[in-house]
Image: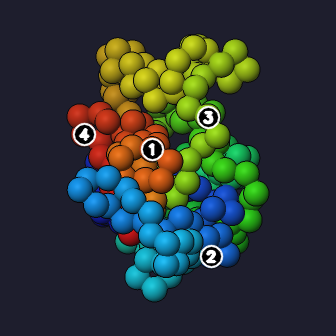
Amino acid sequence: CCLIGVCLKSNKVTYLIDNSFYMHEEYEHQNGEIINGNWQSINNPDVLSPTINGKHLFEYVIASLKQHVNQLPSSNSLQDDNKMYIQIIANNSFSNYLFEEGPQELTIENKIRTLNYLNNLNALGETPIDPWDDICRILENEYVGQLIILSAWKPNTIYASLQKPCVGFSDGEFAEIVSEYNQFVRSKSAIGALLIDSISLYNNYCESSKNYFGNNWLGSIAKGAESECVHIK
């Protein structure tokens, strides 16, 4: 059971989707390529609306997630220990939850609800993804064992503050706070460490040298021992 190169390692999975306008087919991204390990711009054309396997970014994410969910086993036929619990959060600076009440068993009924939710999503938010509140809450949630983040853009900020703290900390980079809490607090609890994987679409935010902005937020958040950042172009 894999999604765009990231395989499931837990039966309690939350998917965090970027549904900002930066994922929309009408948004044109900087055109470039990796030369000698570093991103360099291309001027002809200098911007483009990228496609993956013939689909625009958000269309590709939704199609891939629907296929992925369809392949997941419904919990109706599974023993309690093996039942799937899922949640999907779409974020364009505001969070849109599949299940407002939190992660739910993937029953046949909830699988239909999930597919309907995905069918009704669009990428029209004019502000970029702001994933930190969701990630910090998930870090303390016993019903999430693995988080998979899908994005083609970058948050406005990478720093916690008094107005936007994370697991009680209000000073430092979110990725560092998440990593340290995960390693020194959550991993020593009964629920174990949270596995965080990320999928970077078109723009490679796994490594700072591989994108126009010199930003590696998806790589930073997915640097645990069993975590990975996958770039899809």
Q: Report whether residue 190 is seen.
A: no
Give the Cα separation between the discs numbered 3 and 2: 24 Å
Give the Cα separation between the discs numbered 2 and 4: 33 Å
Of tags 2 and 1, which is closer to the observer? 1
* As drawn, 125 above or below 43: above
Badge 1 element: loop
Q: Earlier in the sequence, mark 1 or mark 3?
A: 3
Badge 4 element: loop
Q: Earlier in the sequence, mark 3 or mark 2?
A: 2
Q: Earlier in the sequence, mark 2 or mark 1?
A: 2
Identify the residue shown where x is 39% and y is 25%: 179
Checking the image for residue 114, the label placed there is none
Identify the residue shown where x is 56% and y is 66%: 29
Q: Callout 1, which amino acid? A: Gly
Q: Callout 2, which amino acid? A: Glu
Give the Cα separation between the discs numbered 1 and 3: 14 Å
Which quadrant of the figure has residue 121?
A: bottom right
Checking the image for residue 214, the label placed there is 1
Of tags 3 and 4, which is closer to the observer? 3
Image x and y of residue 183, in percent? 33, 21
Checking the image for residue 226, the label placed there is 4
Q: Earlier in the sequence, mark 2 or mark 4?
A: 2
Q: Which residue is mark 2?
A: 25
Assess whether mark 4 and mark 2 are in contact (beta carbons under 8 angstroms). no
**Tag 4: Cα neighbours inside 10 Å, few (<14), some, or many (≥20)?**
few
Q: Which residue is mark 3?
A: 157
Identify the residue shown where x is 50% and y is 48%: 213
Assess whether mark 2 and mark 3 are in contact (beta carbons under 8 angstroms). no
- The answer to which of 76 and 3 lies nearer the viewer is 3
- The answer to which of 36 and 100 lies nearer the viewer is 36
